[in-house]
Amino acid sequence: MAAETVTYKRIQDGVADIAKLDKDALSGEDFRKIRDFLSRRIEECYEHELWDVTRVTEKRFFRDDWIGVGDNAYAVGDEVYYPVTRGYYQCIRAHADSFESPASGSPASTNEDYWAAAAESYEGDAWDSSVAYVQGNVVLYNELFWVCHTATTGDLPTDITKWGQLTVFLRYVPFVQSGKTTWQDGVEVWDKDPRQGFRAAALAKSESSLGLHVFKDVLFVWLEWYVTPPRLFGAVWVTPGPYAIGDQVYYAATGQFYNCIAAATTELPTDTAKFTVVNLYQHFEIAMVRLTAADTLASQDQSDDAVGEEYLGNQALTRKVFRMRQQKGHQGRPNVGVRR
């Protein structure tokens, strides 16, 4: 379940109330101060503890599922996961027919017209021009393995009308997968869901230009990482822009900050093709308000009030840690202040 969020405007209003500022008519200077103070305090909140709310845990397969609807074309070498057989396959013959599934029948057998089961190694005799090869035969030619998809005698394995090249299956999670979140630095790999107690074991991994490689013969893995704290730096949105990828704006109509993900001019920040909202977790709301108010009061030379708000903000975080650990069955006082 996605974590509940709170708007920036709600945080800003809370800070303004404590600092006795007119929340409905903030000056540009006060807007920038609160934005910058909050951005720093968000980072502190994230680093205070390994929060469940900032943890992402996802089950990942090593390739996207085979798509059996629409006009979907597969090229030689494409690799897919087929849930029906719980197996990985590679395309050995280009096709655009979405009904050519990697396997069919009961029990299921590989559709050798177009697909071959993906494997980490292959075996086959050296290709011989005098041998009559039938569908499914594997040969070694030019130090590469090839599989016959159309019966042949004498045709070189490089003839794509008869043969398909077999490639070694690498067990890696691609950086980009359909409908999945892009993981962040510090990602861990597990053989089971790490949220289910101590049954999960961490797996050895490494990154390459392809993705996250896993060195164990498993069908899927669980990825776990902690999201990085959002930065707030944008100015109030105006139209026309222009806005480039990486820019950030504040949209008063929603009270939210948005990051630009595609070049924009007159498009509203709520246009999801151009912008993505900067999420602020409700989990930290009280702490964010109190700690940001402390900075705001300090900037007004109200040091005594600032100290009080600092204390209340840290107490809010301490209570959150204690509650989280209670829910997990931990005993004793929380060890706050250090993100391990």
Image (spheres, helix red, strand yellow):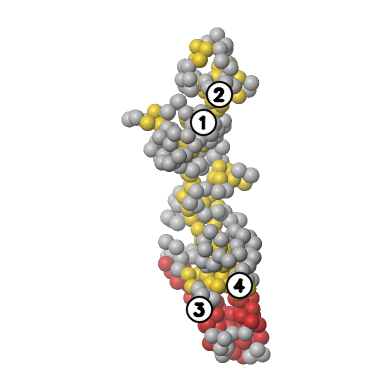
- Kindly identify the amino acid type of the residue bearing the numbered disc 2: Ile
The answer to which of 197 and 288 lies nearer the viewer is 288
Residue 204 visible here: no
Residue at x-position 66% and y-position 86%: 299
- Kindly identify the amino acid type of the residue bearing the numbered disc 4: Val
Cα separation between marks 3 and 2: 62 Å
The answer to which of 172 and 337 lies nearer the viewer is 172
Q: What residue sits right under mark 1 in the picture? A: 94
Could you tell me if the residues under marks 1 and 4 are in contact, i.e. CB atoms within 8 Å?
no
Q: Where is residue 53 in the image (x, y as percent from the top left)?
A: 49, 65
Q: Residue 238 carries which label?
A: 4
Q: Which of disc 1 and disc 3 is earlier in sequence?
A: 3
Cα separation between marks 1 and 4: 49 Å
Q: Which of marks 3 and 1 is in front?
A: 1
Q: Which mark is residue 10?
A: 3
Whether residue 98 sits left or right of residue 205 in the image: it is left
Q: Which of disc 4 and disc 2 is earlier in sequence?
A: 2
User: Mark 4: which secondary structure?
Assistant: loop
Q: Position of residue 229 (x, y in %)?
A: 58, 66
Q: What residue sits right under mark 2 in the picture? A: 160
Q: Position of residue 217 (x, y in %)?
A: 50, 38
Could you tell me if the residues under marks 3 and 4 are in contact, i.e. CB atoms within 8 Å?
no
- Give above or below for 82 relative to 201: above
Cα separation between marks 2 and 1: 9 Å
Cα separation between marks 3 and 4: 21 Å
Q: Which of marks 3 and 4 is in front?
A: 4
User: Mark 2: which secondary structure?
Assistant: loop
Q: Which of disc 2 and disc 3 is earlier in sequence?
A: 3
